[in-house]
Amino acid sequence: MTAGEAATAPGMKPITLGHEGVGYVTKLHPSAVGKGFKEGDAVGFLYILDACFECDGCQIHNLSCESGKQLLQGFTTDGFFAEYALVDYHNAVILPSNLDIKKAAPIFCAGVTGEDILKP
C-alpha cells in the first residue's frame, strides 16, 4: 500500500468514516421545511439512512426497519468525518444552547447518556 491509498476490503469502495454526528444546519431540503429546523441550528443526528421511520421495527430503532434498506453511515456508506453530510430530519434533534457541540457527538452513540456529556 502506498501513502494516501485507502485500506479497504477487496471489492469495497473507500468510504468516509464517522457514525456519531453533530453539526450546524447549512441548508434545508424542502421535505424538512416546517419540521422545526432552521439554518444555523446546532443539531445532533443518528447514523442511519433510508429507514422508513413508520414500520413497527422503526418504532423500536431504525436499525430494525422492516424495509431492509437502511444503511449505516460511517460503516456501509459515507459517514460524518466530512465537511458536510446529508441527514434525514427524522434522525436529527436540535441541541440545547448550553451544550458544547464539540462534546455532543458521543450522545448519539450507544451506551452514552446526556449526563455523561453535561458533567462539568
Image (cartoon, rainbow, N blue to C red):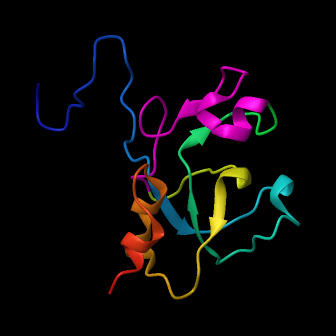
Using the image as rendered, state which of residue 10 and residue 106 is in the foreground: 106
Quadrant the C terminus occupies: bottom left
Q: Position of residue 78 (x, y in %)?
A: 47, 39
Q: Position of residue 29 (x, y in %)?
A: 78, 56
> In the displayed structure, does residue 85 sit left or right of residue 10?
right
Asked if the stretch drawn in magenta spans residue 70, the answer is yes
- Depth order, front residue of 118/73: 118
Left or right: where 63 falls relative to 58: left
The quadrant holding residue 94 is bottom right
Residue depicted at x 42% and y 33%? 75
- Residue 12, quarter of picture: top left
Eyeballing the image, is 13 above or below 105?
Answer: above
Residue 65 is left or right of residue 5, and the answer is right
The residue lying toward the viewer, choosing from 116 and 30, is: 116
For residue 74, above or below residue 36: above
Q: Establish if 40 lies above or below 107.
A: below
Residue 58 on image: x %, y %: 71, 36
Q: Residue furthest left?
A: 2
Towards the viewer: 26 or 118: 118
How many labels were placed on the picture? 0
State the residue lying farthest toward the right.
34
Q: Main secondary structure of the magenta part?
A: loop
Residue drawn at (36%, 29%) of the image: 14
Please determine whether, in this image, residue 96 is positioned above or below residue 34: below
The residue range painted magenta reads 56-82
The quarter holding residue 115 reads bottom left
Residue drawn at x 11%, y 24% is 1
Q: Position of residue 97 (x, y in %)?
A: 57, 86
Indicate yes or no whether the magenta region holds residue 59: yes
